[in-house]
Image (tube, rainbow, N blue to C red):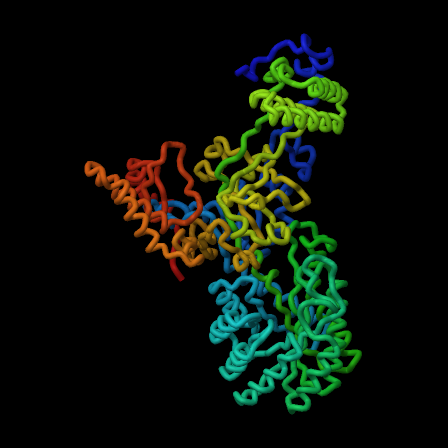
Amino acid sequence: MPALACCVDAAAVAPPGYAAFFAGDSSLPSAVPFSASTADAADSNSTHWSPAHSSALYRIDGWGAPYFSVNNAGNITVRPYGTDTLAHQEIDLLKIVKKVSDPKSVGGLGLQLPLIVRVPDVLKNRLESLQSAFESAIQAQGYESHYQGVYPVKCNQDRFVVEDIVKFGAPFRFGLEAGSKPELLLAMSCLCKGNPDALLVCNGFKDAEYIFLALLARKLALNTVIVLEEEEEVDLVIEISKKFSVRPVIGVRAKLRTKHSGHFGSTSGEKGKFGLTTIQILRVVKKLQDSGMLDCLQLLHFHIGSQIPSTALLQAGVVEAAQIYSELVRLGADMKVIDIGGGLGIDYDGSKSGNSDLSVSYGLQEYASAVVNAVRFVCDRKSIKHPIICSESGRAIVSHHSILIFEAMSATAPTTPAMNQVDLPFILEGLSEDARVDCWNLSQAAMRHETETCFLYADQLKQRCVEQFKEGTLGIEQLAAVDGLCDLVSKVVDASEPARTYHVNLSIFTSIPDFWSIGQIFPIVPIHRLDERPEVRGILSDLTCDSDGKIDKFIGGETSLPLHGLEGNGGGSSGGANGRYYLGMFLGGAYQESLGGVHNLFGGPSVVSVSQSDGPYSFAVTRAAPGPSCGDVLRVMQHEPELMFETLKHRAEEFCGQDHGNEGTHAALVSTIARSFHNMPYLVAASPCSLTAMNNNGFYYCNEEDYNAAVDSGASEDEQWSYCYA
């Protein structure tokens, strides 16, 4: 096979311009590495690169404020108390990864990535900040009632998340919202330990059992409100409450005309999925009045969609709802609470834009002020007592507290040949006359720097060659050489390197389902090496056997992400990453865990909770749980891992146990099969040496010597970590 690296004089087979191009004409632009256009121009063109440049490049100061920053070592840190966080209280994410993934023999936890890091301190700060914003607005505007929020558990039903919210919210009567029977049961259980005045708002479609549970919650002294989503539900509430001898507190969800045009506003408006029209509300009032229960109607609820982009739209919705509230008061209902639903948005891309599903043009204080002002304006005009203001903010409460960390295992190497590696006579040798003409036209267009014409002829040439290959008149070596030539021309003409594919140890369907399902974009950033200039651009490809298992859209409208090379990243300023490359997906604490499936039978990540500590590493791991094992996810799909193991064990005995001189090998095979059922489905990172799998509670070593060395080494005094189970 002729070698592509053998370059010959092109002038013998091509016009002069063509020969000059393949000889490496210095007048053509050369490819340049990626540079940060968002950083300062002077600095980005220099050899110096600092964490500040990375912070600007990845917009960390925009979407991450006030909870994430980059330290001097180039690692992303968590600021658990927001703006009140002191320098020594910042938590280095890379140190968390080291603590979690190191084997137990050297002081680690021996957990496998991918990993969700929860920071309850951030959760607490978000709750306190929301409460403070409303209290400030209420005081500033002379509002004569108070704010009392609830957390919609559908955003993240994790036990410890919900329990933390109830605990942190107890001082200001923060409650829960449920939308299904299981959510109602968990909310009832959690609120038994919360503030007795905290609201338990029961939303969602309801049957008799749901309503019975809600009435039982009221009998158990929980401050429960049954919100009617359908007109027919009022009949069940009246009937069951009389049988159960419980006086219910009832709310109605109004179907407002106000809606926003973004993706998250699709369930609002007159044709929205939920809520009652004005005609239906009046019929509900009449039924309650006829049953002597109109005084039970005490709450008005509405929701105009998640991620409300501007305070102008917010105020329009609140004003409309407040008018309905005032009319219900006029009709004789004992109204006390206006529940403005969800919609408090977060800034996923740092743009502070009101024209995008990824951002909002306001902060917590502007949001609270707009709501209080709108309710006060309508009530004052109607001379109605100011109601308690309730909101169901979920995304804004839990998004920041959770970080998904995963590893890039490998990356596709550039395949474009160098200028002197093009063997033109070999390329032309088997081409048809039309394809030869395309070659010459391509060269001329390249010499004239006609980019679009180059791409046109390159595509045409490749198509002709593919047709020849299908006919059997062109060999695979020549087809590959043509592909290389076209790639080289594309690179020379537009002076950019194609994005590489980084293969990440992750399932997008399981851990970032909103990206696949609705195109939701989250900030994704390397959590270390941010003191180095990212030299390449890449897209992320996951482990699943699915073409949708990739991330090729990023904040800022980018189709690729600035990344560092994987070669030799164990030294220099890699920050103790042991040659590994870790990425973090941020602001994903809402919905991603509850929506994730088991595509390709990849289960969820390992999870740790981390609290700020005054120790040398600024944190303590308070909870740790490995991700689901292969056996766990098999059970989800009704398989029986124990029986599966017995089947494989007997098969191994039948086909591998016949050689009586290798009983040890047979036992090792059976042990390996058993271990596979207990390990996570994700890949285990191995060292460059040949892998001899020795398992130490889920951690693999290259060979027995490495294993023994790790066991014997222990952890030095300055490497001790604070770790406890709460």
In this picture, residue 702 sits left or right of residue 292: left
Front-most of 82 and 678?
A: 678
Q: Residue furthest left?
A: 660
Q: Residue at x 62, y 68 (%)?
A: 392
Q: Residue furthest front?
A: 471
Q: How many marks?
A: 0
Q: Residue at x 62, y 65 (%)?
A: 393
Instruction: Indicate the position of residue 403 as horizontal and vertical percent values.
Output: 53, 52
- Whether residue 373 is visible here, answered yes or no, is no
Instruction: Indicate the position of residue 397 as horizontal and vertical percent values.
Output: 58, 62
Q: Residue furthest right?
A: 381
Q: Residue at x 55, y 70 (%)?
A: 180
Instruction: Indicate the position of residue 643 as horizontal and vertical percent values.
Output: 33, 55
Instruction: Indicate the position of residue 18 as horizontal and vertical percent values.
Output: 71, 15
- Whether residue 564 is visible here, answered yes or no, is yes
Front-most of 361 and 478?
A: 478
In this picture, residue 616 sits left or right of residue 364: left
Q: Is residue 117 above or below residue 137?
A: above
In this picture, residue 654 sits left or right of residue 685: left
**Which quarter of the rendered picture does the C terminus lie within?**
bottom left
Q: Is residue 613 above or below residue 342?
A: above
In this picture, residue 623 sits left or right of residue 204: left
Q: Is residue 469 above or below residue 594?
A: above
Front-most of 428 and 185?
A: 428
Q: Is residue 577 above or below residue 286?
A: above
